Amino acid sequence: MKKTSGFIALTAIAAFFAGCAGNEKKSTTSTTPDTGLAADIKQHIAVLANDSLLGRKPFTKGEDKTIAYIASEFKKLGLEPGNNGSYFQEVPLVEITSAAQDMQIQGAATVALKPGVDFVAATRREVDTLSLKKSPLVFAGFGVVAPEYGWNDYKGLDVKGKTVIVLVNDPGFKAEKKLFKGDTMSYYGRWTYKYEEAARQGAAGVIIVHQTEPASYGWQVIQNSFSGAKLYLQQADKHFNRCQVEGWISEEAATKLLSSAGITGDMRAYARKPGFKAVALNSTVSLSLKNTLKYSKSHNVIATLKGTERPDETVLYTAHWDHFGVGKPDAKGDSIYNGAIDNASGVAAILAVAKKFIQQKEKPKRSIVFLAVTAEEQGLLGSEYYATHPVYPLNKTVADLNIDALSDFGETSNFSITGKGQNDLDDYVIALAKPKGWDVVGDETPGSGSYYRSDHFNFAKVGVPALDLHNGSKSIQRGEEFGKEKAKEYNEQHYHQPSDEYTDAMDTKGMAQTANLMYQLGVKLSNETTFPGWKKGSEFKAIRDKAMVK
């Protein structure tokens, strides 16, 4: 991909996009005009979610246009380039497009499962072709090894050369007795963990059973998000440390497969039984993948407002700019995944916050860094790259304030902190919200594992206190039931779908509320001398404590 260079080009592109905002094909009329922060956010979403950006997929012309627009807005505000004179940080990625043949299950009978219908499968290994040949299938429960919970689904199991079938989420979800964190997903429930653990165990393949409730999204999300081209950070070993095949199987196909080995009824209850041991399914799987490889660089976009007294200490704002590009058409024939909510809203919010910092009379004592990251939808890759290749020292990064997918149904009287209870930033937000009579709650859907699904997690992993704040469900104008219904509607009908697009009817006042809270938090953090920390019991506390030892 060719990176756009020169701000003449950036300015021209920005001007072109400004014209696009009024040409959106599905606009309607808003009943109440948005002003101030809300208007700024709305204008940015209109540009970032315009069809001309082609769904903002990395490695495409959509990336060129997107990062050019963001950088031009940073420059227009007067923010300095954040990476040694550049607004861009290169992120080396490999794009792997895996085309799968039918999955052949051979046991008492041979069954052919259809790619994209019954299963999706891919590989991280950078090879032209790859084949699993009669790999023995094993049901390994939840695929979890968690010593602190006394849980080991791989105990006594040698999976070398074998393919494991594992369940999504962790044993605690909807369990009759308290296991793990109950309905709140632990990292052991995250699909990324399942792949990592299977690789550590030496499995040839790993296939996750999709179930809508414990996954928190439908099978169509898997079909759209886990098929086609996928991006990975480049690695020296070309990802040969990972399983040959990583995939998902539909619940219907998995039920038939497990029943053939005598596992019937509730497969989750079966895997939760005390003393559970992995079950050989008395069948094998064969699968061939043909890969197309493309090496290139995507880009994080980064800008800085230098602090007046402690410029080496930074408060970091993050939001991912990417989405899924052009893909499978929906029922209406729309194939552009515009990602208006996810996450044009977040990028729009940090741009609006940046404007407020520029406009304030007293400049912050600590530096403020604005980071729009790439490839979140491909596995939080842009933020992972920054967190492992930081431009600013992590032990002097005060906090990461992340914004991802803000709701568009107006102002609310409550706000939601993903992973509430992890660090001191929660207390700051509560203190800011309380005088206005606003409530601050934890995850409204704790079983979805949201704490591990956005870019703040990569900063938490390296010890930086990280906050992911969302507007809540208590609509001030229409009540809580309305807000919950709108959230449900988005999750079921628009999340990772072409229908997540801009309309003039978007009410961005709730987005502005959240952005303003994040701005006020940043102001406070930027003028303090202390550093927020992790609360006792957080798995990230020890990492931060070690990093802060001088």
Image: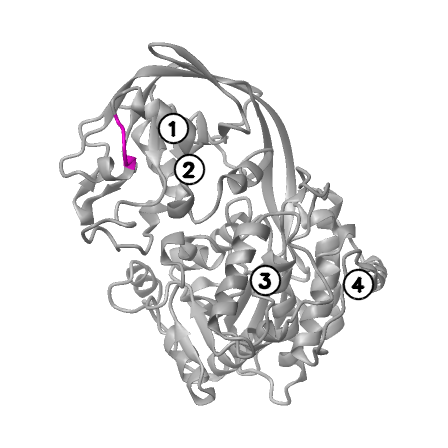
Residue 160, visible in the rendered structure: no
Disc 2 or 3, which lies upstream in sequence?
A: 2
> Which residue type carries mark 3?
Leu
328 in relation to 123, above or below: below
Gap in angstroms between the C-alphas marked 2 and 1 = 9 Å
User: Which quadrant is home to the N terminus?
Assistant: top right
Residue 504 percent coordinates (x, y): 74, 66
- Tell me what residue is drawn at x 32 percent, y 68 percent: 421
Disc 4 or 2, which lies upstream in sequence?
A: 4
Q: Secondary structure at mark 2?
A: loop
Gap in angstroms between the C-alphas marked 4 and 2 = 38 Å
Q: Secondary structure at mark 1?
A: helix
Disc 2 or 1, which lies upstream in sequence?
A: 2
Q: In this picture, which residue range is highlighted in magenta?
A: 263-267
Gap in angstroms between the C-alphas marked 2 and 3 = 33 Å
Residue 210 numbered tag: 2
Q: Nearer the viewer, mark 4 or mark 1?
A: 1
Gap in angstroms between the C-alphas marked 3 and 1 = 41 Å
Disc 4 or 1, which lies upstream in sequence?
A: 4
Colour pattern of the rendering: one colour
Q: Which residue is mark 4?
A: 21
Q: Residues within 10 Å of mark 4 (few under 14, many from 20)?
A: many
Residue 264, visible in the rendered structure: yes
Asked if residue 237 is among those painted magenta in the image, a careful observer would answer no
